[in-house]
Image (spheres, rainbow, N blue to C red):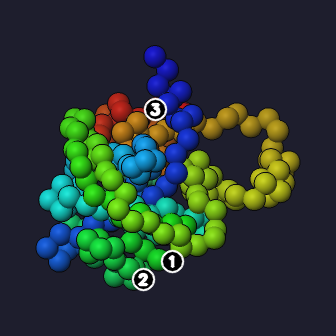
Amino acid sequence: MDKSALFKLSYGLFLAGTEYEGKKNACVINTAAQATSEPAQMIVTMLKSNYTTELIEKKGSLTVSVLSQATPLSLIQDFGMRSGRSCDKFEKYSYQTDAFGNPYLTDTMAAWMSLKVTQTIDLGTHNLFICTVEDAGNLDSDTPITYADYRILKNGGTLSKAAKAEEAEAAPQEQAPQKHYVCSVCHYEYDGEIPFEELPDSYVCPVCKMGKNMFEAV
Ligand SMILES: Cc1cc2nc3c(=O)[nH]c(=O)nc-3n(C[C@H](O)[C@H](O)[C@H](O)COP(=O)(O)O)c2cc1C
């Protein structure tokens, strides 16, 4: 099986936020999708090891907000590459809360949804939350960002078509395509200075802690 085929699936980028006993937290996810429209239901898949997942299980509700193309990479790092177990991720961000008291960011988000968990399915490394949409609203007119957009930005690219075309023209023609290594569990893309192949076998994904063998070349 060529697992890299799975990387061709398109995803958005979202923040899953919750609050339990006074502790509010959120993390970046790409695995949120609408499942049905009448009633409006969504599915959200989250790593069990995330602090946000632990709080959602206890609370039974969460917000999902949709990141727009105006979202700075620093926000994705703040919410997607460190854990709320050791910091207050909301410290420097403006937010509002839904009727359950769960937080969602207001700046650079395209929309927000308030979800109530109706079923939790154990998927091994992840929990799948099946949720009803209790409330929702639009925040920003900016276009939602996709996971593919995020990878372009992270590699120093730009999202405007004209700029992309210019970049392609300016790029040296005979360069060998560069291999990217992506964690098949949480989609973290390795960007260290040491070539991925030369990393020791003990290397683990800094985001979800899965082993080096879980990385795929794309
Ligand atoms: C681009 C990106 C996509 C991610 N997608 C998911 C995801 O779909 N599900 C998930 O559980 N974690 C995902 N993560 C990882 C969490 O955001 C990350 O582990 C975070 O530090 C967890 O924080 P917490 O411990 O405060 O909950 C993603 C991270 C990034 C940067």
Quarter of the render that holds ligand 1 = bottom left
Q: Looking at this view, is 155 or 10 the one in front? A: 10
- Residue count near mark 2 (Cα–Cα under 10 Å), binned few <14, some 14–19, many ≥20: few
In the picture, residue 65 is in which quadrant?
A: bottom left
In the picture, residue 210 is in which quadrant?
A: top left
Residue 161 lies, with reference to residue 93, above or below; the image says above
**Which of the labelled discs sits on residue 94, or is there none?**
2
- As measured in the structure, the alpha-carbon distance from the residue carrying label 3 to the one carrying label 1 is 34 Å
Q: Is residue 50 visible?
A: no
**Which of the labelled discs sits on residue 107, or is there none?**
1
Query: Which badge, 3 or 1, is on the more N-terminal residue?
Result: 1
Q: Residue furthest top?
A: 1
Disc 2 and disc 1 in contact, CB within 8 angstroms: yes
Q: Looking at this view, is 62 or 70 the one in front? A: 62
**Which of the labelled discs sits on residue 216, or is there none?**
3
- As measured in the structure, the alpha-carbon distance from the residue carrying label 2 to the one carrying label 3 is 36 Å
